[in-house]
Amino acid sequence: MFGRDEKVSAIRLTAVQYLILAILLILAYRLWQLQVMQSNIYASLAEKNRIRNVPILAPRGKILDREGRTIVDNYPSFSALLLRDSNRDIAADADLIAEGLHLDPNEVRARIRHFANSPQYQPIFLKEDITPDELAFIEAHRNELPELDTIMAHRRLYPRKGFMAHLIGYVGEVSEDMLNQPQFELYNPGDVVGISGVEREYNALLMGQNGSRQAVVDSHGREIGHLGETEAVPGKTLRLTVDLDLQIAAEEALGDKNGAIVAMNPQSGEILAMVSRPTFDPNDFAVHISREEWNHLVTDPEKPLLNKAIQAQLAPGSTFKIIMSLAGWEEGIAQTMHVHCSGSAEFYGRRFGCWVKTGHGDVNLEKAIYQSCDVFFYTLAEKLGIDRIAKYATMLGLGQKTGIDLPNEVSGVMPSEEWKIRNFKQKWFAGETISVGIGQGAVATTPVQLMRAIAAISTDGRLVIPHVVNPDLLPKGFVQVSRYTQVKMVPFDQNGWTYITDAMGRVLLPEGTAPSAHIPGIDIAGKTGSAQVVSLATRARFKNSDALAQNGWFVGFTPRRNPDVIVCVLFQGGEHGKLAARITTQVIKAYVDKQRRTPPKMADQAEPKGKIEMSALWTEPDENGAESKLSGGRFLIDLASKPPKLATAAPGIE
Amino acid sequence: MSRYVSFRDFDWLLLLFVLIICGLGVMEIRSATTHTKFAGAHVKQMEWVFAGVGMMFAMSLINYQALLERIHWFYIAAVGSLMGVLIFGQKYLGARRWIKMPGGNHFQPSEWVKLILILAVAKYFSEMHQRDLSWSDFMKAGAIVGVPMLMVLAQPDLGTALTYLPIALMGLFLGGLHWKQAAIVLLLGALCMPLAWHHLKDYQKARLTSFLQPDADPQGSGYQVTQSLIAVGSGGLWGGSGSQVHGAFLPVPQTDFIFAAFSEEHGFVGALVVLLLYFIVLMRLTQNAQTAPDRAGTFIVMGVVAVLSFHILVNVGMVVGFMPVTGIPLPLMSYGGSSVLFMFLALGLVMNVRMRRFVN
């Protein structure tokens, strides 16, 4: 027996000490074995046994038109990359690498520094789409430059010559700024993401997930085997609402002129075509576009990167008179208003001129629309006042983003008394209202906004949300479908709707403002517009320089009520709306031609060839321009021996 | 009885060596985590060490006799907290080991249970009145350690559960275990092995066997052992380039494999210095155990010795390919708050005993 204070056996304590000594001696002996006796073996293993993560790049999803024709594709190309898992000082090789790959040595060094803090096993991409002789250079310098390697990548193939470039957008390496935004937070530096257009808006869908292969490499960077592989997940295909045939027609119609075209189905809001000029070729944007090239694009005064269809905010000119007409009708003023236009009128002590110097004579609402009489709308604006104008314009979506599924849309400006105070801390002057009446002054719209507002008027109040992708074809839950398909009904008086659209139907007739744009056999309604960039006096001071020429507008649709298609054309420097009208009707004709050719029943019938004779009846206004008389005639129609070919893919995409 | 207890009797020498080891650890954590997402971990580790030293002083002030008198309450609390982990714990990498604390820190109760077990075992054996260890003592001591051990095994955390075992073994050995009894227990244990093996999870089996044949599965669990051996071996006599550490080939170089990282960068000489420092600390601890005022004090200090040497054996053994990969950190060097705080609290107990060696 021993008590509480009996000491623990000293022998056993000593035994524990010896046990500890023995354990540590064994461990020390093992360390001696590993680090001294077999050190050479492990040192060479450390050299040989290097595992490198070689990325397997996922191809981005293709972009197709509404009928499944390819617009954007990928093609395989080789990229040069720099591996950093060897102990070489790669910055020292920068000059030789830059020479072989035709790069700027300072850019190479800057890139190495830029990625200095990312994990060593992640390679740095140096150049995309290297040429065969650059590939040969890398192969020939395997021993001198073991850090240089190549990888097969899928590079974006965009249509030629900037076709549809603004809508599609382009891809590029994710920037520092983007990484700080929540929607890009999951990406890594070096990832290629959509920078603009659809490529950006639907990046999450189009972008696949890169895989990787764990390659075992020796100290010279040569692969000697591999351990495992995570396969890449390709991006998903995206189908747009754009009709390639209409897009081609719109691109051709605008040609090299500055401006924009948007075509839409006014019932659904599906965008059928979108063009902006000047354009750029996204194929030139390899991941590393040189600084000079980029600066050139960004500083170009014509702003080729701007998608004017959604980003140009300009005075809508006379096209705004349609919104004025509706406001006037709904307020019960316009339908009974009669004005005598003598070529100008005085409001608030200032003389406002009409575009027809000799005057329009007696004008009612109908004539004011198809002849675009300024004095009528000055008077209407004075009677309505700015806030009532702003109320209807705002109901039709002016001064707000349309919500189109493209990045960086701008909102335009719809002035009101409250707007003036909020932005300029000044009271609204009644005189300013007069200019707004003809779409000048502070009011500014984007083409897509203007088109949407007039589409709502043409469809008896359906205010749609324009969109370039059919939400039903997207993966479930990717977007909120209602964000695309919701339609706000703007309540109109039925009579006003009929009256205004009928008046718009006369714009392309001989008595209208754009008879030269008339296309026989297609019922096109529309409205011309021409808007000053600066005041006429200022323009005269600059010797009527082309840079300050007026912008031509036209918004046209067919048929005149509940149309299938609506097209808005902005022709910058186009001086008069009738030139824009001709462009518009060309696009509408392409649409109608395609529709008429498409019905399957027609295809089954034997197609008549050569010339055929037809007779027709029509009405036309008499000398007074008021009453119409019935006329008739016979025509020889030359039928094309074969119908024009439809596109199979965007230009440059085979 | 109430003799003046003073910090003059504090084991400053022991603290000095302990802090040197911590310093080497902080240095290596810094080196291994630069350019990784863990960069800055060494600063955090330093904060843990400072906090640990503070807690050590605090722990040394509470008379260990008072702690022993209330040990049954602590024991119940320990079992309760393990139960809490099993029910409310955060599941991370397939195991429930952590409780999320307000403020975002994670607390691993299985660490501080070790302290309670050291005290509980010390209390049990110091009150045992027969010179010979009976089978009933054997069963009771086994139960004290066995219950929490099974609960930690259920988390599942095989590594930490095993660290409870040396506390019981040290108690039994110093408590007067017979050679005959030891032989019987060893035999029984050997017989139970196949049964226990059957209950292990597949990844645990893989970890236990892979160290024997690291090349069998070079990408899976054998990968860590292979990379660790390459790291240690390529360090040579004076230390090497550290390409295993900096090339991210060595897994978790700041926690479980910190000794491999240190050995690669500082060679055989550096590794030997670390082992020597641990040896000095362990010898100093055993010396404190011998000068303890009573049996309970000796058992407490030797419990700490048991845990510390077991950790060193298993961790360094793992790094040099002698032991399976069990996820046991190297005390005082590996990065991690729970582990650092446990070690300093345990040292606080040792100081507590030492400061009262002239009492009575």
Image: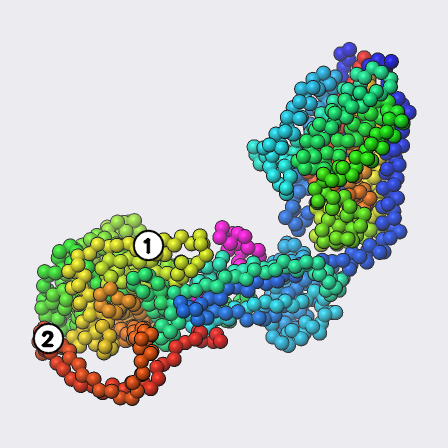
Q: Is residue A187 left or right of residue A618?
A: right
Quadrant hosting residue A146: bottom right
Residue at mark 2: A628
What residue appears at the point 9 percent right and 60 percent down from the top-left corner? A336
Identified at 71% across, 51% down, the residue is: B220
Q: Chain of mark 1?
A: A
A29 or B210: nearer the viewer: B210
Q: Nearer the viewer, residue B102 or A477?
A: A477
Q: Position of residue A16 (x, y in %)?
A: 87, 29
Mark 1, Cα crowd under 10 Å, few <14 / some 14-19 / many 20+, is some
Q: Nearer the viewer, residue A602 or A191?
A: A602
Q: Amino acid at mark 1?
A: Gln
- Chain of residue at mark 2: A
Q: Are marks 2 and 1 in contact (CB under 8 Å)?
A: no
Q: Residue at x 62, y 33 (%)?
A: B86
In this picture, which residue range is highlighted in magenta?
A168-189
Mark 2, secondary structure of its residue? strand
Q: Position of residue A307 (x, y in %)?
A: 39, 65
Residue density around tag 2, few if under 14, some if 14–19, many if 20 or more, within 10 Å: few
- Which label was assigned to residue A486? 1
Mark 1 element type: loop
In what quadrant of the picture does the N terminus of chain B appear? top right
Answer whether residue A39 is magenta in the image.
Answer: no
User: Please, what is the three-letter code of the amino acid marked with disc 2?
Assistant: Ser
| Rendered location of residue A439, percent (x, y) | 24, 63
